[in-house]
Amino acid sequence: MTTSQLLKNRAEFEEKLRKLIGRPILLIELDMFALPCGCAGITANTRGLEVDDLEVFEPQLLLHLKEMASNLEVKPTVTFARLVPGSSIVASLNWRTLCGRCYPEFARGEGKTPRPDLYMLQFERRK
Amino acid sequence: MVVSVLAFVDSPQKAEFYEELGADSIVIDSNVNRHFDVLYAIRDSVDCELKLLVNEGCLYRCPFRYAHFNFFSHAFGPEPRPNVLDDYYYYKCLELRIENPELIIKSPWIRPEDIKLYREITDVYKIGGRTHFVEWILNCVDAYHNESYDGNLMDLLDCPKDLKDLFYISNKSLDGVLEKQWKNCRKVCNKCGYCRTLTKKVAQVYTRGGTELETLVPWETVKHDHITTFKKQGGI
């Protein structure tokens, strides 16, 4: 993964979001991360995206999210949006390959918002 | 003694109150920057120095203004500080303007070119943005000193960088608007629509930013593309 590929993916994903939602959503930052626990993945910090957009466009959005993960060679266990708690604001979209420690926390959660700041888009349960 | 813009002095009565307390200078509430009747009334009521904050990018009559600045005071003030995850007002304010850049146009900033229209009120201007890089501050000072700026209005506004990365509003495309429209505007937006039309004309959005394909498109195009995409998908 090179920085130019990351830049290209940020721009392309932003454009897809705009065409889908119909507003100039801003993808303010696209990050790849690794955590000390063993989780790794991608975070896309968004501005102008709301929970309503996720609810209405979830199937279409998931396709774009999967494509993006594949482009950046990430196989996410979980895909979620992080919300500003108590509001309709989506602060970021996250693709995460969960480590052994964090997996049970997500697996125990129920519903679309297992935590006030999480909106679950996809979760791959272990068999 | 200088009365802060956050004392919200937006009337001759408030100005008189602070002058009687001993104020040497009052920074007028930026919400009335385009209310010339109020500005003249304040000028006629007090003898102290008046200052105008020229480049604040905040929402006109922002509903979060008191709460947001109160939040700042607690979040960045002395210990103990509240344990808060996010600044809701920051996100919400950005979201509102991304959805409707008309709100940027309506913000009560004063363009460098329009300073001359305020000469009868004051000749002291405050440029906001002390936490920015020095180069940004110098660019702003240059623009206001020269009373002219040929570039993106967003370069001058003290607002989140996020908006500058998204919008391009040619500063020169707003020549004459204050004198022609805003100076006498009654702020009944739903009956007027001037700023709505102006926004469609002047607001552009960066697309494919950070790549060699980066370009500007009219803000309206984004909505149009969305509808076209949906029609193609059989959505409408």
Image: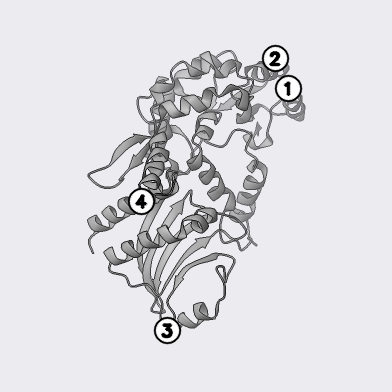
Q: Which residue is mark 2?
A: B44
Give amino acid for label 2: Asp
Q: Which residue is mark 1?
A: B12
Tell me the quadrant of the picture where the N terminus of chain B can be found. Answer: top right
Question: Please, what secondary structure does the residue beneath circle 3 have?
Answer: loop
Q: Position of residue B8 (x, y in %)?
A: 68, 33
| Secondary structure category for the residue under label 2 | helix
Real-space Cα separation, disc 4 to disc 1, in angstroms: 51 Å
The residues bearing labels 1 and 2 have C-alpha atoms spaced at a distance of 8 Å
Compared across the picture, whether A73 is left or right of B108 comes to left
Q: Chain of mark 1?
A: B
Determine which of the numbered discs, if any, sits on residue A16 in the image. Answer: 4
Q: Residues within 10 Å of mark 2 (few under 14, many from 20)?
A: few
* Rendered residue at 55%/77% (across/down): A109
Image position, residue A82 (x, y; %) = 50, 62
Q: Which mark is residue B142?
A: none
